[in-house]
Structures are given as C-alpha cells and as structure tokens.
Amino acid sequence: MASEQFFDVGANPIQLKLDRMVFMSRVFNFSAGPAVLPEEVLKEAAEEMLDYRGCGMSVMEMSHRSKTYVEIIRTAETDLRDLMGIPDNYKVLFLQGGASQQFAAVPMNLMKNKVADYILTGAWTKKASKEAKMYGDVRIVATSEDENFSYVPDCSDLEISDDADYVYICENDTIYGNKFKTLPNTKGKDLVADVSSCFLSEPVDITRYAVMYGGVQKNVGPAGVVINIIREDLIRDDVWPGTPTMLKWKTQADDGSLYNTPPAYGIYICGKVFKWIKAQGGLEVMGKRNAEKAAVLYSFLDQSDMFNGTVRAEDRSMMNVPFVTGNAELDAKFIAEATAAGFAELKGHRSVGGMRASIYNAMPMEGVQKLVEFMDTFEKANRA
C-alpha cells in the first residue's frame, strides 16, 4: 500500500496533495469485468481529475450540456467510428443500464412481427431470450446447452423463422469462454449481437450486423456505459407499445446520447481508451496481440497434465479463458496462491467452476507469460 497521506489536517484547510500521489503497486488483474484498463489512461485521468485541461473542474463535475463535455462525447464517437470503420448509416449511442438493459430494449425496438430467433451459447443469451419472451415469440434455433456451452453450434444452415424480426447472438460468452469465429447465416434476417466481452478486441465488419452493443466494463471503460451501434433504418417511432421513453433508441439518437444526463465520466474514460487503441496501431494490432496472448495460455493448457481448458479448441475465446484441474480443493489452493502472488480475480464463475483468466486489450503479454510460469511452477509442486 502507498504510505503517502493525501490530506494535511491541521490549522490550515484540508488540501489535496496530488503532487505527492503515488500509484500503488498494480497486480495483474484477470477480472472478467469491471476489468483492467490501460495504465496510461488511468494516469492521464488522474492528472486531469481536479482540472480538466484548464477549465478549473473535473469532468465529474461539469454539465453534460457544456461546450467542453459535448466536445468530449463527440470526439469519443468520432474516434470510435474511425477505429471500427462505422458507416454514416449507423448511429452510435452511449447509453446507461449496461448490456442487460438492452435485453429488453432490443425486442422493444425491433419486434414488429413479435418473433425473434435466438442462438443460445451461454448465460447471457439465456437471460436475453428470457427477457425477450415478454414481448413476443422467441424461438431457439440453436444451442450448446447440452454440453454446458463448451462449444458454439453449427450456424451455417439454421431453420431461421420466415417472420423473424432479427436473429440474436452473444458473440463472446464471458462466463463460458466461447466465441463465434464465423457469424451465423441469418438468411437475410437482421443480426443483433451482444459483443460486451470482445468489443474492440479485433477488426470487425460492422455492416454484417444490424445492431451491435456492448457493456464497456470489459475492454473499453468503467462500468455504467453501454455502447450501441444501430443501423439507422431500425431507429423508428413504431416500437413495441408501452416502451419507456428512455428505452426508445430514437429518443437517444435524436439527442445524440444527451437526452438526459449520460454516464459522463465513464464516456470520458472510454474516449481515452479509444485514443489509446488508435495510438497502439488500431484494431489490427489489438487483434494480433490478443491472438498471441491467447496462444500462450492455450498452448500451456493443451500440454498441461493438471490444468484443462473447458471449451472446444475451435470455439475458444481470445478474451476469456476458463480452465479447471478437476479437483475443487486444488482449484481453491491455486486461486489462493495465485492471488498472494499478484494474480488477481482468477476464480471461475460458479457455472463452470475452476479458474478463468480474462485477458482483455489492456492485459500485457507479460501478465499472461507470468501467469503461465506460475501455473507451471504450481503444477510441478502439486503433482500427485
């Protein structure tokens, strides 16, 4: 822990001493979300905490309708469009409520025929489909639940409903660690994708999606923001009857994500992350780095006699890597010793058990290499 005192208490008023701020030693944070952010971004935000670029206040304090903040959110959108190559006929919305709120917003805004096809590959598609059932007929056209979502089903020739308003996927399941490497054949129907845990991890062709959305707390920023990228023709007035004003995409699009007070500081951090990714070389570089990091961890798992991955090799995520020993006591021992050694948040989700290493954009290769070294040492020390 840092020993510096942030406040002087005495005869003089309390004064925040930023000049004495010391960043504590940082662990390798493998949390699935909220997750690791680029250290450069955190340091820059810290420098601007009390005074954003000479305006005399923090971004936390300023009006969302001020000229300064409007520039922040508009620059963030421009940088995101540049990174992803988002065409002009797509709207970019910075919203509240997280990805989970979009489980309801999607059917409310898109279910004209009140029919939608869902592909179940984990916890998030199950939750999304359950929510959508309140607004129409949800048909499950493929699922991998039979093997605890350890694979992505073949989606090359699905029985897509003729009257389906859209086909829905979670492209990367954070809990189970599976990833669509090939998008499903929707047979002309609009594709809606929750990309929360793979957002900005590699290049994508946004024109293959009708709607793409993601909570930013995995790869982009702090919890509290969801980014929704929507083809413009889908933003309309004729939504599901009773849709709350705040959940109508048109409400938000018409006011440029400023209909009400947005999660202003979170969007500000997202904007800094966009600039950081651009400075690193963009999504091509991110994709290459992420593939290399994942290869290091999966290569170790594939040769290990103790640790085993839980997802079929061809469907493995680059972002979320679940693994187990098959022994709950050994798993617990590993997690405890790894935590003590500076590898944080490795405990797996209860649905899978064991461990999970989330290796998002901001996780350096060094963190993955050191984790593998620790796993190797642990295995040698705990052989039966």
Image (tube, rainbow, N blue to C red):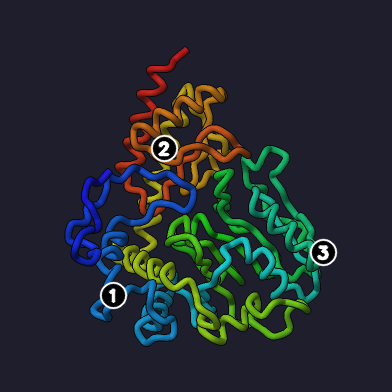
As displayed, is residue 379 above or below residue 357? above
Q: Quadrant of residue 138?
A: bottom right
- Nearest to N terminus: mark 1 or mark 3: 1
Q: In the rendering, which numbered label is found on residue 297?
A: 2
Q: For numbered disc 2, what is the local secondary structure?
A: helix
Q: What number is the disc on residue 165?
A: none
On the image, the x and y values in percent for residue 26 come to 30, 46
Side (left or right) of 103 relative to 27: right
Which residue position holds label 1? 52
Q: Earlier in the sequence, mark 3 or mark 2?
A: 3
Q: Please tell me which of labels 1 and 2 falls first in the chain.
A: 1
At horizontal 50% and vertical 23% (from top left) the residue drawn is: 330
Q: Is residue 166 found left or right of 266 in the rendered image?
A: right
> CA–CA distance between discs 1 and 2?
40 Å
Residue 259 left/right relative to 47? right
Q: In the image shown, does 77 or 265 lie closer to the viewer? A: 265
Q: Is residue 221 visible?
A: yes
Residue 354, image x and y in percent?
A: 54, 32
Q: Which residue is mark 3?
A: 137
Viewer-nearest residue: 169 or 334: 334
What amino acid is labelled 1 in the image? Tyr
- Image quadrant holding the N terminus, namely top left
Q: CA distance from mark 3 to mark 2?
A: 41 Å
Disc 1, disc 3: CB below 8 Å? no
Three-letter amino acid code at disc 3?
Asp
**Foreground disc of the pair 3, 2:** 3
Amino acid found under the numbered disc labelled 2: Leu
Mark 1 and mark 3: Cα distance apart in space: 49 Å
